[in-house]
Amino acid sequence: MFAAPLAPTRTETTRTAYWTRLLPLLAALACVTRIPSFVRPLWNPDEGYLAVEARLLAQGGQLYDTVVDRKPPLLPWLYEAAFALCGSGSLTPLRILAVLAQLLTAVTLASLARRHWGDRAGRTAGVLYLLVSVGLNPEDAQAAAFEVFMLPWTAAAVWCADRARWGAAGAAVAAAFLTKQTGGAALLPVLWLLHRRGAVRAGLPRLAAGFAAPVLGAALLTGPAGFLFWTVTGSAAYAGVSGSPLHILGRALANTALLAAASAGLIPPLARALRGRTRVAGGWLWAWLASSAVAVAAGCHFFGHYYLQLLPPLALLATAALHARPGPPRRHPAAVLTSGCVCVLFVGWGLLAPRPELAHAERLAAAVAHRTAPGDRVLVWGMHPETYWLAGRTPATRYLTAGLLTNYSGGRDGSRVGEAYAVPGAWPVFRRELTTHAPALIADDSRGKPYAPARLPTLRALLASGYTEVARVDGAVLYARAPGPSGTAP
């Protein structure tokens, strides 16, 4: 005879009931907060860059060779896989994956908080994170871009380290790094936990192996030299601190103010924790916040989407302060209510605010598509690679933005923008590509920026020798190949 199956224990039943109630709430909240992400074809140039990369990879391109970017490979591969399954004409599949990424981050934070401060703290952490996750300019918070897909891995790394699963923690840090380089900042709280648990001798080799295996695997798949150059050594100029100090300071203050407004419900408990009035146990939390702050400031660009990396440790710190013992009752409903009201404002902003740069890119893409055939290669000289994707045209070069060829990025002034500050070796490759695949159309979308062709001898000579102006679109200038003596383009 077979023995009857053991009945579930009280602890297992309680755990199942807890997540059965909490998961639907967090899932609904994740969907509601990201409704704005579905109302526009794309939100920022990062999404456009990834979409163009994915199409080129699907056509047989090789990452870090015929398709290049300063980012690790995980998200381009994810875009490529989504396009392979669902087609490349819409980012809706990536929007859905972004909702799942935010949900996974919230669930992981809830699990961490529940383990340390109890059931109510778990619910508070998950809800607070999702409410503040949209508290930036919608083009930063709603895009299906690098930080959104990096955060589940950073949270998973801390979750695994909190449970002394060092190999898994290392793999999660590697996955975060392979999504965006600053995801490697999660290594600091992991190492903090490793040290505090006295497990350095036994855990460090497993942590190192867990980290090294995915990174080495990605390097072998893409080519070690190209992987190292494009993810680490080739970005020195971009990560430098040169540029317009006032412009950089203004962006830093503006995005910090936005995040502070979104975190209005979190600020009082965080202030109490900082003043020491509420005991928040766990130096790992402060280490996580500090490493995330360093990651945001790295390179002195202070783009809004960088600030998303601060949100998981901020939500956990506020949760710890709210549920510390002893403490005044009824603090956490006020924090959640305040965060919810602010969240509504940011979601409304995402639904209603106009996006003039997207409208410009759409008009320019329509003009490019009108003047070229589907098989033509084109060059869009600017910082909006989404134009290629919207127009359905293949780039004439592996360099999808002028930034890679001039070092232009937000905050750079004209003093360190030009051919001399490009990614090392880029201009010879660029000239060779334009000779091999001469673009049928060149769209100069610089619109008075420091990377205008007038300041770049190579591009200026190219336009003068073989192209003629044919149209203007919102300040962008379109050049078509001029016919040669025989009536064909040179």
Image (cartoon, rainbow, N blue to C red):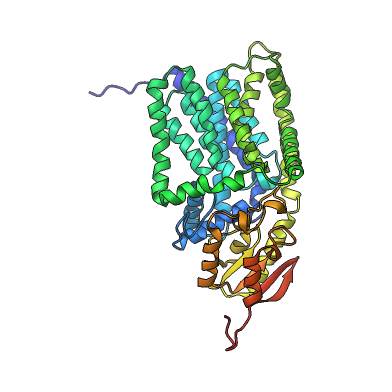
Judge whether 455 appears above or below 148 on screen: below
The residue under the point 52% across, 63% down is: 429
The residue under the point 64% across, 14% down is: 279
Q: Is residue 421 left or right of residue 449?
A: left
Q: Where in the figure is residue 147, as x and y percent of width and height? A: 58, 42
Give the farthest residue toward the bottom: 486
Q: Where in the figure is residue 172, as x and y percent of width and height? A: 47, 35
Give the farthest residue toward the left: 1
Image-quadrant location for residue 337? top right
Judge whether 372 appears above or below 192 on screen: below
Which quarter of the rendering shows the C terminus? bottom right
Image-quadrant location for residue 482? bottom right
Q: Is residue 33 left or right of residue 205?
A: right
In this orientation, which residue lies closer to the viewer: 392 or 194?
194
Q: Is residue 409 left or right of residue 218?
A: right
The residue under the point 47% across, 53% down is: 81
Q: Where in the figure is residue 393, as x and y percent of width and height? A: 57, 67
Judge whether 414 appears above or below 394 on screen: above
Judge whether 111 appears above or below 448 on screen: above
In this orientation, which residue lies closer to the viewer: 369 or 379?
379
**Residue 104 is at least partly visible in this image:** no
Q: Where in the figure is residue 92, as x and y percent of width and height? A: 58, 53
Which quarter of the rendering shows the N terminus? top left
**Residue 319 is at least partly visible in this image:** yes
Q: Is residue 416 left or right of residue 10?
A: right
